[in-house]
Structures are given as C-alpha cells and as structure tokens.
Image (tube, grey):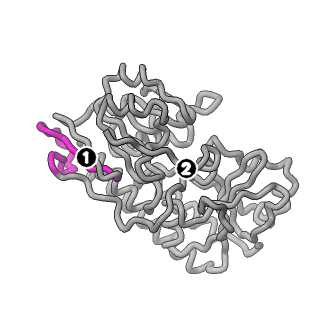
C-alpha cells in the first residue's frame, strides 16, 4: 500500500487559501481514466470488472461497478449531479443549525451517512459498517487525500479501493471532465439532456465572463478569506477556479505571498494594502462572512466594500457543469456592473 505524505501546510493555512496547496506548473491534463471495463457513458448497466485510473496515477479496481460509494461531500455532490448516488459522506456537510453546508450542493444530506463533518473527523467504524466498495475524495496536494485523517488513513484505505481527483493544479473545465469521467465509469449517462444542457450553459457563461473581462480590463479582483485575526489574500494561479478566471482574462491582485507561496496574511490594520475594485470572499462555513466583519472598521472603509462590490467566492467548487456555470455568470455580472474604485 502506498503511504501518502502529510501536507506541509497548517490546517488553518490550508483552509484559508482554499485548499490551493502544491507548487509547480499547472498540469496540462489531469490524467485519463482507464478505459478497461469503463462504461461508454450511456448509463447502461455493465457486468464484469471495473477500473479507474485516478489523478495520483493509481488504478482502483473492483470485480464489478462499485455501488456502495463513500465520498468527500463536494465530490459526492458532483456525482449526484450526474445521477450517481453515494452511501456516505465526509467533510463539511451540515452547518451548526443542521442545514446542508454550501458544499453539499443538491445532495439530500438526510439520505447519506455522515462519517465526519469537520477536519480530522472520520468515523472508521461507521465507514466499515457501510461495506464500502469505493472511497472518493479531492486532492489539493499530490497524494494527500482531502479530509481523510492521517492518523486513520491506513485503516480507511484497507477497506475499499480509493480514487483521488485534483482540486488544485488544474482548471475548472479539466476538473469537471475528470469528475465526469469517474461518473461515466460508475454508470452515469453523461450524454443525458440534463448534462448536455448544463455543459452548454457553462460554455455560454465562460464566453460571457471572457467578454466581461475584455470590456472592463482595468477592473481588479482580490481573492480574500477572513478569520477573526487575519485576512488572507490568495494568489489566483494557485486554485482551479481563479486560475481559470485568469485564463478567461480576469485581472487579479497579486499579493506578496508567504514562504509557502499561496497567500499573504494581513492583519486587519493592514487590510487596505491592496487596491481592489471587487473582492471575492471565501463562502465556506470555515471562514468569516462579510456580514460578520461589520465590527472591523478597516474592512468597512475599503473602497470595494463601500461600493457594494463584494461577492461570494465558491472556494471549493462542486465540479459539475450545473454547479460551475452559475459561478462564472456571477463573476461576469459583477465585472459588468463594477465601477473602478481601487
């Protein structure tokens, strides 16, 4: 069994940057699924062996197509959009009031076993009780399985084959394609009208964002995430979403990143270090939201805040066309309407 190495970034730093960990050039491709035993994407049931080559370069294999699937919540939500359901999930699934977390998408969290809801939490006994046939999660750093705790990782990986898909060192279209590849191998009909319509909407939204960026070339966007003590400004090229936005022409603030190379930590006294016309704020439950920052006077004085040009950032996108198209549309609309204030 391959021993996966631990991420060198701290939990807080990793979450703050939006999981954008791992250095190096963005991959030209995220790997190809192993065609042996995979479906054609028609949604038809198949018999015989199943296999899938993941983004670690490892091939998961089973005697038949896995049915009892356990996945990181965001991956589970993407598979759901393709018609593939899971038995259990882990990662941010429920908010403190019991509602579905933003990362759950359209998944009905009442119908799945929640094995862990926070970082470091994964109930191995419950996992074993599901008789898992496949474990699927995201990968922000090579060979590091997102939200699979290091202390119980070996026990977890002994119980079922695993698949890891890049959520960093890639772009949105490539990440969607890899999730679609996996869904197809699991029996999804990726040519269904719902899927093709969603892809068309995504392509239309991408064209709109490209046009908006071209029409407003002087508008600068800052990628932020807030905690009680610090404000994090992320480097756009280190995350799949913002790297793709850059490719479409969006101009981003480029912070003087720390030693890790992904973001700059600013005290709230220095939150005005960079001029920005639009601020995209981390929308995850692990980060403070704009309405919780009203007590911080330096935040309220920022030109983008005063102009009402603060928008949510879906820091961990659900990689389906259905969920990513609205993200592109929202940013396009913000840029179309933005005034130069920075």
Residue 322 in sight in this render: no
Q: Is residue 10 above or below residue 157?
A: below
Residue 334 relative to residue 53: left or right: right
Residue 131 relative to residue 18: left or right: left
Q: SS for tag 2?
A: loop
Q: SS for tag 1?
A: strand
- Residue identified by numbered label 1: 59
Residue in the image at 45% along x and 60% along y: 169
Label 1: few (<14), some or many (≥20) within 10 Å? some
Label 2: few (<14), some or many (≥20) within 10 Å? few
The residue lying furthest to the right in this view is 297
User: Residue 290: percent from the left, percent from the top?
Assistant: 74, 50
User: Residue 187: percent from the left, percent from the top?
Assistant: 23, 42
Q: Is 285 in the magenta?
A: no
User: Residue 270: percent from the left, percent from the top?
Assistant: 82, 61
Q: What's the magenta region? A: 36-55
Q: Quadrant of the N terminus?
A: top left
Q: Is 43 in the magenta?
A: yes
């Amino acid at each position: 069994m391959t021993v996966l190495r631990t991420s060198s970034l701290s939990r807080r730093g990793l979450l703050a940057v939006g999981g954008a960990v791992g250095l190096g050039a963005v991959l030209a491709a995220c790997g190809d699924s192993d065609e042996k035993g995979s479906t054609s994407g028609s949604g038809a049931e198949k018999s015989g062996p199943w296999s899938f080559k993941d983004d670690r370069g490892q091939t998961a294999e089973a005697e038949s197509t896995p049915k009892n699937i356990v996945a990181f919540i965001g991956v589970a939500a993407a598979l759901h959009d393709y018609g593939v359901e899971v038995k259990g999930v882990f990662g941010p699934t429920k908010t403190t009031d019991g509602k579905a977390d933003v990362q759950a998408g359209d998944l009905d969290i009442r119908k799945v076993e929640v094995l862990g809801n926070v970082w470091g939490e994964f109930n191995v006994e419950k996992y074993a009780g599901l008789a898992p046939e496949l474990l699927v999660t995201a990968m922000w750093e090579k060979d590091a399985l997102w939200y699979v705790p290091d202390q119980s990782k070996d026990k977890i990986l002994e119980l079922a084959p695993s698949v890891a898909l890049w959520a960093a060192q890639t772009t949105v279209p490539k990440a969607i394609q890899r999730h679609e590849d996996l869904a197809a191998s699991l029996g999804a009909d990726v040519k269904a009208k719902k899927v093709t319509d969603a892809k068309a909407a995504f392509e239309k939204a991408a064209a709109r964002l490209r046009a908006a960026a071209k029409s407003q070339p002087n508008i600068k966007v800052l990628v932020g995430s807030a905690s009680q003590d610090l404000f994090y400004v992320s480097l756009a090229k280190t995350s799949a979403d913002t790297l793709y936005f850059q490719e479409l022409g969006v101009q981003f603030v480029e912070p003087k990143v720390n030693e890790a190379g992904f973001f700059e930590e600013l005290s709230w006294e220095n939150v005005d270090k960079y001029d920005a016309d639009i601020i995209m704020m981390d929308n995850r439950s692990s980060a403070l939201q704009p309405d919780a920052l009203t007590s911080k006077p330096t935040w309220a004085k920022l030109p983008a805040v005063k102009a009402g040009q603060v928008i949510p950032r879906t820091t961990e996108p659900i990689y389906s066309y259905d969920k990513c198209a609205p993200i592109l549309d929202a940013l396009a609309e913000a840029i179309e309407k933005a005034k130069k204030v920075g």
